[in-house]
Image: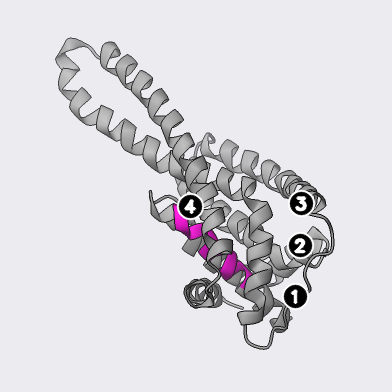
Amino acid sequence: MTVTDGVRAFVDGAGLVRTSQLGAYIWLPALVSAAIVALGLWAAFAYADQLGDWLVASLPSWLDFLSAILVPLLYLLAVLVGTWLFGFVAIILSSPFHGNLSAALEPHLDRVPAHPAATRPLHLEALAALLREIRKLRYQLPRLIGVLLATFIPVLNVVSPVLWLLFGAWMLAVQFADLPAENRQEDFSATLELLRQNRGAALGFGLCVTPLLAIPIVNFVVVPLAVAGGTVLWHRMRRAT
């Protein structure tokens, strides 16, 4: 599967959300994400305000005119970084809802039978989702540290923006394409292998989600769309292998 297939999976998933009439499954994780991102932005603006005051106070008098440029840029950076970072945190913390949405969407896919409802109690489902997220973090953190280190290495830091983009795209594909596998209690390593076999499609899907996650307001609703797109992607990758 190619990059185009990944993009198409996201677009088809978004269309599936629009026509599936599963409002409770869709808006609950969106509201949880909105609350987390709003709290994160409040904290980011608080620190940006303090940093802005320090920056203005540190400028020599003959560079005072730069405060009119640097301070707005600082707040813009707080918005962009804060929405992406806390959007990613929101995805992890609202993950128990995502599996239910993914399972509810599956009957609306072509040639996909309804996935049997989970038989475990709700608290065990939440615990299983949390343990799965910890497993994903163990996979993500070493790679995050690697990309972060590359940002400070001469020569490599020239391409660090591209590395960050590809890293974010891959991790979002891992996050959302794993949901159907998690619902079936398949091992996380099986999801990774499936994504590696379809690396182009995984990156195409992730490259759709990554920029949307950095746009204020839009990132509140992109999570349910990504859940649906990841579900579509997983099924299509399974059929292709």
* Mark 2 vs mark 1: in front: 1
Q: Nearer the viewer, residue 136 or 87?
A: 87
User: In this rendering, does residue 85 appear at all?
Assistant: no
Left or right, 69 with respect to 193, comes to left
* Mark 3 vs mark 4: in front: 3
The residue depicted at 53 percent of the width and 68 percent of the height is 204
The residue depicted at 56 percent of the width and 54 percent of the height is 29
Question: To which residue does mark 4 refer?
Answer: 162
Q: Secondary structure at mark 3?
A: helix
The residue depicted at 45 percent of the width and 29 percent of the height is 43
Q: Nearer the viewer, residue 148 or 119?
A: 119
Give the answer, above or below, for where 72 lies relative to 50: below
The answer to whether the residue labelled 3 contacts the one labelled 2, judged by CB atoms less than 8 Å apart, is yes
Question: To which residue does mark 2 refer?
Answer: 182
Check disc 1: other Cα within 10 Å, few if <14, some if 14-19, many if 20+.
Answer: some
Q: Position of residue 161 (x, y in %)?
A: 46, 47
Q: Which residues are magenta?
A: 220-231
Left or right, 203 with respect to 183, comes to left
The residue depicted at 29 percent of the width and 34 percent of the height is 73
